[in-house]
Each structure stands twice: as C-alpha cells, then as structure tokens.
Image (cartoon, rainbow, N blue to C red):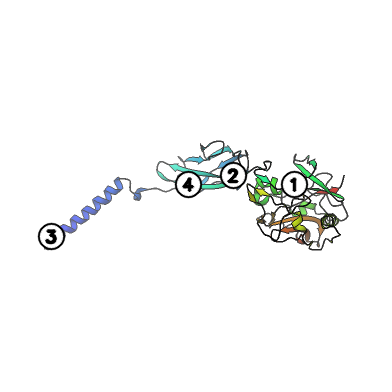
Amino acid sequence: MRKYSVFFTSLLLITVFAFTSCKKDKGGTDDTQYMTGTLTYTLPGFLTASQEIELSASGITEPESGLVYKWTTTGFSADSIIGQNVTITAPAAHGDYQIILIVSHPDYASKTLTKNTIVINPVNPESFSGVIDGPGSFTDVRDGKIYKYKKIDKLDWFTSNLKWRGAGKPYNNEAALTDIYGVLYTWNEATGGVSSSGLGNGPRGVCPQGWSIPTRQDWENLGSAINGSPVNFDGDWKGLGQKLSANALLNGIGVWKFSPNNLKENILGWNALPGGSSSNNFKSYSNINQFGFWWSSSERDSKNGEYRLVHFDMADFPYNFADKGFFGASVRCVRIAQ
C-alpha cells in the first residue's frame, strides 16, 4: 500500500507542475508586468470655448522608454491624438467633456487616467446669462478687456468684477472663470496698500486709469441709492444684497446656490455674483457659488481691510474685515459720474 501511496503522490505533483507550466506558457497573470509610478496630467476644470490647451503626461517611472500615450478627446479639435505632449483646441460648443489618457507598452499592462472638464462661453447667452450689461462701455488699455458700467446716483460703477491679471489670481487658478467672476485680490494688491476716504477719492490700486477702489463713502452712496434713504457703511444693509444679486446661469445651472432667503432681484443691474474668496496668499479657495466679497479702500486697522459681502442664504449686504495680505476678494471699480 505504501508503494501505491508514493506513486499517486508523485503523480499529483507532476500534474500540478504541468498545469502551472501550461498556465504560464499561455500568458497567465503570473507573468504580467506592471508600470511603476502614477500617471498624471493637468486639465483645468473649466475651459473657454475654442481655447487652445496643452496636455502633458508624466509620472511613469518604469519602463523609461517605449511608452505610447493615446489621448481620447471626443469633441475637441481631434477625437484622438498620440503623444506624451499634445496641443488641442477645446470644443466650440459649451458643455461637459471628458479626456481619457491611456499609456501602453508591449511588455506591460497599460494604465488609464480619465478627467472631466466644463467648457463655457461667456459671450454666448446660451452658456452665460442673467446679468444686465450697463449702458456705458470702457476698454482697459492694459489688456484690452471691455467693461460695462452704469451711473448710480453720483458714481459710475463697473457692472462686473475686475478681470485684470496683473495682480491677484482667478478662483482656484481657473483662468476660464475670469470672464464670469473676475479676479481675486488681496486688500494690499487691490488698493496698492493705500487707505482712502471721500466720494470718488479712493486709490486707483488695480483699477484702470481714471477709476478707483470704492471708499466707504462710495459704498454708502450705492447703498443709499438702492435703499431709497441714507445708509451707514457699518450697517447690515437689510435686504440690499438681494436687490444687488443677479440670478445668473452658467451652462444652464444657477451660479448661486439656491435659497428662498435671497431672491436675487438685481434691480439696478449691479450684477452681484458669488465669486468666492481665497486665503493664505492664494493657497486655498472657498465660497464660490455661496458668497460674493468686494473690497473697500477703507481699513479696519493697520492689519485688516474692510469689504462688503453677499451670501446666497441672506438678503442683506453687510460689511466685514480681513487680513490685508491673507484674504482674496473681488474688486469693483468706480469713478465720479461722467
């Protein structure tokens, strides 16, 4: 009996070895080689229609050569393109799009990375709507940007946020959002570090020639015009945030988070939008679609500058203050009415 036991044990080992060898010969998973490193590329969360963009893949450390990068870019200027570094043009039609990158090698399992982006078109009312252009028009000679403005009582006000890129940064570094929400600036950048007072007497700061950062008196003039009676800068300005906010849509979606407490009447076409804020010298971003913040040239003290704000869930337009070099907010430019 012992001889038969040894015989069957030997037969079983031979069978297992043969099966394993056969499995390897047929390309089993035991022989699969995997790339090392993390495949990556940068794709903005927002693109402007027909914008040219560069895509650069990186992150694979092994193998070092023989890699093939294939981009699937349906709806862009090419539906697919080969290369580690490629240039393509964003779709002309606004909407949600996807880019798929596959890196392959004949001796390794491939890797795939998919990212999404939103294409917007600020000049197409089917993409961006709900704001009211002011009757006046002004071109900033520094960059050719065109601003609409409106006379409100004693002052001309921009009816959109400042977009100048010579200082500050767009929200989350999303350049495509600049034409919607403008640029965020610290108080020091916005004012040039200068606090001022008096109607139309604010510092030029980041504004174009002939325009200035609104003073406390400028803000009070605006608030009084909307309120129908005088307001004080330090007040909460009950109900005035609702009257200044625009019920704008971006690709069919409301830019403000919804709340019945702010009905976004935009009665004067001032077009308050929730451009959010930055902090820690533009290292962090928050509050988009919920808050709009606008600097005053006034200072709370030597460390803090003052601003006004609108919240999606609040009808008021109160003021607050923040560190002059830490907090980033939007800017509206004003001048004595022409």
Query: According to the image, label 3 marks what residue?
Result: 4
Query: According to the image, label 1 marks what residue?
Result: 132
Residue 33 falls left or right of residue 171: left
Give the Cα distance between marks 2 and 1: 23 Å
Front disc: 1 or 3:
1
Q: Earlier in the sequence, mark 3 or mark 2?
A: 3
Task: Indicate the position of residue 60 as horizontal and vertical percent values.
Answer: 49, 46
Query: According to the image, label 4 marks what residue?
Result: 112
Label 1, residues with CA under 10 Å away: few <14, some 14-19, many ≥20: some
Circle 4 sits in a helix, a strand or a loop, which is it?
A: strand
Give the Cα distance between marks 4 and 1: 44 Å
Label 3, residues with CA under 10 Å away: few <14, some 14-19, many ≥20: few
Front disc: 4 or 2:
2
Q: Amino acid at mark 4?
A: Thr
Front residue of 300 and 123: 123
Task: Indicate the position of residue 201 as horizontal and vertical percent values.
Answer: 87, 52
Task: Indicate the position of residue 224 as horizontal and vertical percent values.
Answer: 84, 57
Give the Cα distance between marks 1 and 3: 95 Å
Label 4, residues with CA under 10 Å away: few <14, some 14-19, many ≥20: some
Task: Indicate the position of residue 57 as horizontal and vertical percent values.
Answer: 53, 44
Query: According to the image, label 2 marks what residue?
Result: 95
Give the Cα distance between marks 3 and 2: 74 Å
